């Protein structure tokens, strides 16, 4: 049994493998638990391995490449046309295997840990900025429920919150004041 191409459908705990030989005949269809993947792949002769791009695919691509395999990451939209039957892990692994061998296919370069670190930084910053905007808008909207209108902008909201933290309750009920101060603390 010589596997030339292996498609791996990555999941949270169980991975589905679909391997073919040089003639395109299926020689391996197997489910593996996450912890067994590298052990099994380490025993295989180097081959072409295809995986869909997902949250953990760059990690797995780096780990598998260390074992001597050539790894190709494929956008999920490019795999979908190759699913021949109902969608399940085995069918997906077969489609990934097929897609990995297409001559004009677009593959995603495997990102190094440093590259992923920078991406995490940027995505975290974007998330925090979106959350900040959401909280500012929520505070303004909650104040508006009591007829207290604040202009847009973080400074205007900060002024209101500062007054609320002081003695100025604006006639806002204590339960609402407490909630507004909790949002301000989150902000």
Image: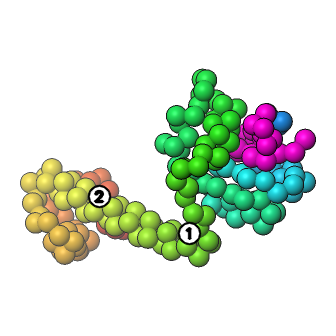
The residue under the point 75% across, 37% down is 24
Indicate the secondary structure of the residue bearing disc 2: helix
Indicate the secondary structure of the residue bearing disc 1: helix
The magenta stretch spans residue 18: yes
Rendered view: 6 above or below 91: below
**Disc sitting over residue 134 in the figure:** 2
**Disc sitting over residue 50 in the figure:** none
Which mark sits nearer the N-terminus, 1 or 2? Answer: 1
The magenta stretch spans residue 71: no
In the figure, is residue 31 to the left or right of 55?
A: right
The residue under the point 72% across, 59% down is 70
In the figure, is residue 132 to the left or right of 35?
A: left
Rendered view: 111 above or below 134: below
Region of the chain picked out in magenta, as a range: 1-25
Q: Nearer the viewer, mark 1 or mark 2?
A: 1
Q: Is residue 91 visible?
A: yes
Instruction: Measure the alpha-carbon separation of dots 1 and 2.
Output: 27 Å
Relative image position of residue 142 (x, y in whole percent): 21, 53
Rendered view: 70 above or below 22: below
Which quadrant: the N terminus?
top right
The part of the image, by quadrant, that contains residue 15 is: top right
Residue closest to the eye, 55 or 99: 99
Relative image position of residue 102 (x, y in whole percent): 60, 45
Label 1 neighbourhood size at 10 Å, few (<14), some (14-19), many (20+)? some
The residue singled out by tag 1 in the image is: 116
Name the colouring of the figure: rainbow
Residue closest to the eye, 120 or 64: 64
Relative image position of residue 53 (x, y in whole percent): 57, 52
Relative image position of residue 87 (x, y in whole percent): 59, 28
């Amino acid at each position: 049994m010589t596997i030339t191409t292996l498609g791996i459908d990555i999941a949270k705990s169980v991975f589905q493998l679909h391997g073919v030989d040089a003639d395109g005949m299926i020689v391996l269809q197997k489910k593996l638990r996450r912890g067994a993947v590298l052990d099994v792949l380490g025993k295989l002769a180097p081959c072409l391995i295809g995986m869909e791009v997902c949250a953990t695919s760059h990690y797995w691509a780096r780990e598998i490449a260390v074992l001597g395999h050539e790894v190709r990451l494929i956008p999920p939209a490019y795999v979908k046309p190759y699913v021949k039957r109902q969608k399940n892990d085995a069918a997906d692994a077969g489609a990934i295997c097929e897609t990995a061998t297409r001559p004009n296919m677009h593959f995603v370069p495997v990102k190094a840990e440093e590259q992923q670190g920078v991406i995490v930084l940027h995505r975290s910053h974007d998330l925090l900025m979106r959350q900040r905007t959401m909280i500012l808008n929520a505070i303004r909207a909650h104040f508006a429920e009591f007829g207290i209108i604040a202009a847009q902008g973080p400074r205007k909201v900060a002024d209101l919150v500062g007054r609320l933290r002081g003695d100025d309750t604006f006639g806002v009920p204590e339960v609402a004041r407490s909630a507004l101060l909790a949002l301000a603390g989150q902000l």
